[in-house]
Every structure is written in C-alpha cells, then in structure tokens.
Image (cartoon, helix red, strand yellow):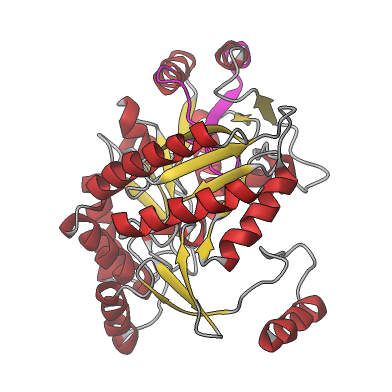
Amino acid sequence: MELAQQLLAAKRDFLVPCVYHFYQRPPVFVRGEGAYLFDSDGRRYLDCYGGVSVMNAGHSNPEILEAAIDQLRRLQHTTTIYLTAPMLDLARVIAELAPASLRRLFFCASGSEANEGALLLATLATKRAECIYLREGLHGRTKWAMSVTGLDMWRTDPNPLVTAHAVPGSRHPESLATIESLLQRGTIAALIAEPIQGNGGIVVPPDEYWPELRRLCTQYGTLLIADEIQTAWNRTGRWFATEHWNVVPDIVTVAKALGNGFPIAAYITTDEIAVHYTRPGAATFGGNLVSCRAALATLAFHERHRLGERSATLGAYLMGHLRALQQRHSIIHEVRGMGLMIGVELRDAAGTQAAALLDTLFEEMKDAGYLLGKTGPGRNVLTLMPPLVVERAELDSLVVALDRSLART
C-alpha cells in the first residue's frame, strides 16, 4: 500500500478537493482484462461497476484496442473542421441503430457536453428558454447540465439557472401532473430525463411514465431529451433504454460505453430539429479519429457477441438471485433495475437509509475481490453494472460473497 499512500499524497497536493475516490483503503489499479481489474500488488477484482457503466465490452478488449491503435499510428487528431472518414462512418452506424427518425449527430467529448449541447439545440429549435428536469437526476458538471441536475450531491453550483424547473421524479404520483402544469405555460423548450436514474439510485419508472412524457411533450410543443449516457449501448438489454417503452425522444444524449473507455459523446436528433442549428459549432475533440474508430469497433463487438441479449439474460438471472438474498437479509429493502443495471437499496431495522452499513459492506466486498457502486440520494443503494461480458459463474461468486458480507452486517 506504499504506492497508494504516495498517490493519495499527490492527490491532496495537486488536485481540486472535489475529486474524491471510493474506499478508505483504495487499491491502485494498473491493469484490466475482461470483467476484471488488477491492482499494483497483483490482486484481481471482479469489476461490478464497469467504470460507471463505461466498460460494457470489457476492459482492454483487444478488438477495440487494435482498431484504436491502428488509427493512432496513422492519424491521431484533426478536428471537426476537417473532413475525415471515422466520424462519418460512426454517425452512419449510430443513425442505423437509433430509434426511428433520430439520424443527425453532433459529436463531443463528454456526457456533460452532450447534455449542454442538447439543451442549446432545444432552445434554438423551439425559440423558448426554459426547461424541466426530474429531482434526483444527474446530467453533468457544466453550467446548464448542473442546473438541471436534481441530485443534491452533484449540484454544487450555488447559483443555478432560474430557467430550469425541478419536478418530482418518476416514482412520485404527482410527477406527471406537475410536469403538465409547467408545460401549459408555453415557455418550456425541453424536458430532460434519464430513462432510468443511475446516480439517483437505479430508479426504474412505471411502465406508463415515458409514454406519457412523450404524449405531454408532443401536446405542448416541448422537446423530450432522453439522457442515455448511462443506459445506452445495451446496459439495460437494448441499444437504448427508451426502446423498452417504444418511445422515440426528440433528442438522445450518449457517451460512456460508446467508446468503451475512449472519451466520446454525442447527441442524436431528427432532421427537423437539427436544421435549426446552422451557425458554426465545431468541437475540438468531437469526433476524434481514435475515439471514433474505437466506438465503431465497440458497436461491432456488441453486435457480434449479442451483448444486448447477454445483458437481458444475465440481468434477469442476477436479479433473481439478489431477490433470493432479500428474503434472507432484512436489510435489503428493494432490488430493482433492467438488464445489468441493478440497484440494491439497503434500509436498517427502523426503515431508514442504511448508508453507514452500505459503506461497511462496500469495503468488505472490495477486500473480498469485488468492486461495487453506491448511488441514491442517501448513498444507500448498492449498484451493480458489470461489463456485459461477465460470465454467469462470476455473478454466482458475487452473490455468494455478498451473502456472506450481508450476514455480518
């Protein structure tokens, strides 16, 4: 752990204090392979968080790395102001995968940037200035993206934009009525929401929720933005999570797993909406050649290995075993999710959020060789988003280790 202490000291000396890390005794990760990470002492960990839903095709996937390295050797960077093939090849592939009429893309480097751009496009297309967001959602770190972030932990801006209006989340009965009352003003450019709230605690909406959002936005001339930054690329068992409800948003934002570790993001929209954005809008690292080649190889790997089907099948298998644990451990309040995007909410005997107990469990599981996530407003939701290449036997071992740790809490 000497290396860990050296790195922690450097972190304290040189990074902005907001940059935090998991674990009281953090390992130093130096290598990844498939569903595993390896630390500087050679110890192996099953990665059940996937770099926060990034490594869907597995760590250091050779098929993706070879494509990126080949591009890196030939040409590393131009930018969107020059004509190159990888960005346009990727745009064509994504347009074929995206729902219905979503076929116009703007590439950028991060999810925050994609959401910022989507909100800008909505104001240009509607000539309106306001937007709606769900409480306990997370949309990014830039000014507008943070202003539509309803999760207190991540909304650190003391002066968010007053044009952003919060409404109760999808599990609250008053959510849709509150949304409609705001839409009736005729001033709302866009409603932005995650199909499944990730950092909000893996909140899966009722089946009727997204179809009703679609109906209301259409009725009042407001654009519906689906933030699929965590949910896209087969994390929930489909290319896009909104496909579960047969809903086609006006704009979809994507990032994370698209590049399988290479930084790339985009928003996707229709011809009719895209036509409103004609002034220059270049992005220095948008459509980066290496990231685009990696993304093309990533999507090809998904198709060839049917990762959507794997996610749906393995997710149902894992949730079944987790619900069996729920019968044995009263601390498990709820197991929820879609595909391999699963949340296990913990509450103590008094019914209060068990954040401290989760922290203890979190450390124990790390020491046992399993890396998990923790989300939710109360930081009491154990979050499982492993690479989609994970094997059933590896999930079995996870459940056994979790059962043992829960028995000690």
Extreme residue in the left direction: 304
Left or right: 262, with 146 as reference point: left
**Which residue is nearer to you in this view: 358 or 102?**
358
| Picture quadrant of residue 138 | top right
Which image quarter: residue 381? top right
**Magenta segment includes 390:** no
> What residue lies at 48% left-to-right and 30% top-to-bottom?
204
Q: Position of residue 278 (x, y in %)?
A: 43, 48
Q: Find residue 14 and report its image quarter.
A: bottom right
Of residue 41 and residue 169, the one placed in the foreground of this image is: 41
Residue beneath the point at 34% across and 26% down? 245
391 to the left or right of 40: left
Question: Start and end of the magenta stretch?
Answer: 181-208
* Residue 109: image location, x then y, percent: 49, 63
Tell me if residue 247 can be seen: no
Task: State the image coordinates of residue 97 (x, y, percent, origin top left).
Answer: 24, 46
Judged by its main secondary structure, the magenta piece is loop
Residue name at image x 39 percent, y 31 percent: 249
Residue at image position (48%, 26%) is 205
Q: Nearer the viewer, residue 336 or 275?
A: 336
Please determine whether, in this image, residue 111 is positioned above or below residue 339.
below
x and y percentages locating residue 279 in the rendered image? 48, 51
